[in-house]
Structures are given as structure tokens and as C-alpha cells.
Image (spheres, grey):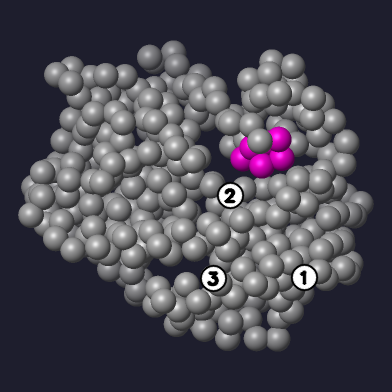
Amino acid sequence: MTALETDLLIIGAGPAGLSAALSAAQGGAAVLLADLGPGPGGQIWRGAKASDGGESGTLLRGVQRQPNITALYGAQVALSERGPQGGHAVQFSTPQGPRRVLAQKIILASGATERFLPFPGWTLPGVVGAGGLQAMVKSGLDVRGARVLVAGSGPLLLAVAAGMRAAGAEVVGVAEQASPTRLLGFGLAAQRGGKVGEAAKLLWALRGVPYWPATYPVEASGGERLTQVELGGLTRRTLECDWLAAGFGLVPDTRLAALFGCALEGGAVKVGAWQQTSQPGIYAAGELTGIGGVDKARLEGSMAGYTATGQVERLRDLPTQLEQARHFQASLSRSFALRPSLRTLPAAGTLICRCEDVPHAALQACPSWTEAKLQTRCGMGTCQGRVCGPAAETLYGWTFTGVRPPLLPLPLADLLGE
């Protein structure tokens, strides 16, 4: 097994991880940047290149210019333990075989995962996550001429709809479960946060596309794949469509942090004033500390990078800027809080755990996530609760528990090598 040593290991190469890497490298530390994806950018900047304009291109160019940053892509965490001399030992599974990384300190920047809420027909081919469809199109899926309905909750819906339209799809509408009053409150917060320009661009890109507040999907139907979707709530109608991009916001992806033993609070990783977690030498930044967007992720990444490498003098105005970003985060959470009626959408036979074919009726009587796993195998399939975990928390009020290594399926050769 190949062994690598570094001063700082950063897991996640999205906005937070890239910002952390650049900040840490400026102080001369040896940085290893690892990500499960085939390249940098994370989910939000998937496929980004250093030649791109805007924030992503600028940040990637800065990272590439730092000779003390080493990248390890296609790498998923398999095992972790305390390393020699108080450091950390992390084993990764990569396309080139297992890699063991010895690091003095770690920054976790694993981002967020999309929340799916089951409803009748949500397992039909053609029903996908909003962010999932966006990623598929960025990876080459041809949606030209396809009828796409975007539904769920959160600002991501508008970005996905605009992306689908730019890719040549016919966006038949956007259904947002939040009420008009809450959307107005979010608009005012966005104005105070200086995000009016971004919103205006999205609205212009979606001119002519119907937008229905307080509306959500109640059933998807079709034969071998999706053909129509029934909407409920304030706007009730049935739409013919080829794709339903449904996502009910994002939730922090805390599985990696739980594997390292970091304390959680309110469904996110608990951090101190300088992004330290409850575990010595481990920091966290970005969406896994609370959903707040790119600005918050970049600021937290920079703060974690500076703090982990002892560059206290570079922090300067970061705490003030972060405070402003977190005000926007709080507004985001309030404005797009899920309405209680969404918990009544699944029918008795609606699958909640798709990996193990566990229906809603089998889970309603379970008092906890642990009991559900014991009695039904819910969350014990390939995704290890990544999809059904957030859904079950919303539907039944459970706390997702039981994270164990490995987080994702590993090649047998890696286990034999170990």
C-alpha cells in the first residue's frame, strides 16, 4: 500500500476545500487535497477548469500555482485511526489502489447531500434529484427538447431550471413548496446580502417559465418511465413531462465527520469560533457545518486553512464577513423550512429505502433509526442511508446513526491489500 505524508489533509475539493487548500499553502504547509470526484469543484462546481471565468476559475488557478498542494482525486475514505505522534492516519480507496495518508491535521469539507422526500411514483425512471439532473447534464446527458419539471424547495431549483433551459430543455414549470410570504422574506434577505444580481440573472434566464409557490409534487406516474406529475398545494394540476427534478433542499453530509468522531449539533458538524471540531486537530468548513451557500463555504474554508496552519495574522476581517454570511444562512433555513403536509405524501406501499425495498408501512411503527435497521434493513444497502437517512429524519423524526467504515462499497482488492 502506498503511504503519503502531509502537514494538512483536506477532504473535499469544492469551494470550501479549495479555499482551505489555498489559504493553508500560502503559509508554506504541505497540503494534500482529496476528493471522491474525478476532479476539483465538488458538486456545485462540477467540471470546473482553471481557464473558467468567475470565482471557480480564479480559485482553481490560485490552487494550481501552489507547488505545495498535491491533489488526489477519485479517492474515497475507507478507514481512519489515530496516527503516530498524535496525527491522523486515513486510508483511501482510489482507482490506482489503496493509499494511506499520514497527516498532522485534517480539514473536512465534504459538503452537502440532496434531500429527497418520497411520494408515490418517486422511484420511476425519469424522477431524479434536482442537483442530480444538473450533474447528469454537466456530465453529458442530452436534454434538448425534453420536458422538465423542477420541484421541491430552495434556491437550487431556480439554478437547475435555468441550467436545463440553457441545455435546450423545455422547462414546464418550477414548483416551490415554500409559501409566498416566506419567499418574500428570503428575497429581502438576499437583497441585504448583495445577491440581487444573481437572482436577477436567474429570473431573466427563466422568463416565461411558470413559477408556483406553495406547490409540490404529490404523485408521479407512467409505464416503464415517467410521463406525468400531479402537483398539489396552492396550484393543483397534472403536467406531462419527461423528467422530474425533485429536491427538497440540502442537508449537511456529516457521515465523514461522524466517522472521525466529531460532535454534531442540529444535523450539522459542531465547530468553534475558528472552525475547530470537537476532535483535536480536525477542522470543518462549508455546507457540512450548516447550509449557507458558496460565500459561507469559501470564507469558512479560508478560516480553517489559516487556523490549521497557524496563520492567525491573516484572519483579519474573516470573522465579520462570516457573521454576515451566517445571517443569510439563517434566513435560508427559515424561508425554506419544509411544510408538515410533506410528511403525509408517501402511501403505505411507497418505498422509502430504495436499496433494500423497504416501504413506508414497514417503517411507521419503528421508534428509531436503529430499530428500523434491525427490523427492516433500512439504510443497509449500497448508499448506506445517504438517500433514505435524510428522508427518514424528516418523515419520522429519527436521528440518523450507525455510521461505520467503509462509507461506500470498496473493491475487494483494497480489503485484501489491507
User: In the figure, is residue 408 to the left or right of 152?
Assistant: left
The span shown in magenta is: 390-396
The secondary element bearing badge 1 is classed as strand
Residue 324 image position (x, y, % from top left): 34, 65
Residue nearer the viewer, 56 or 117: 117
User: In the figure, is residue 258 to the left or right of 382?
Assistant: left
Residue occupying image coordinates x 52% and y 30%: 408
Q: Which residue is mark 3?
A: 186
Mark 3, residues whose alpha carbon is within 10 Å: few (<14), some, or many (≥20)? many
| Kind of residue sitting beneath label 3 | Phe
**Residues at marks 1 and 2 touching, judged by CB atoms closer than 8 Å:** no
Residue occupying image coordinates x 62% and y 40%: 390
Indicate yes or no whether the magenta region holds residue 197.
no
Tell me, for residue 114, which label it has, or none.
2
Mark closer to the observer (1, 3): 3
- N-terminal-most mark, 2 or 3: 2
Q: Which residue is mark 1?
A: 147
- Residue at the farthest right position: 223
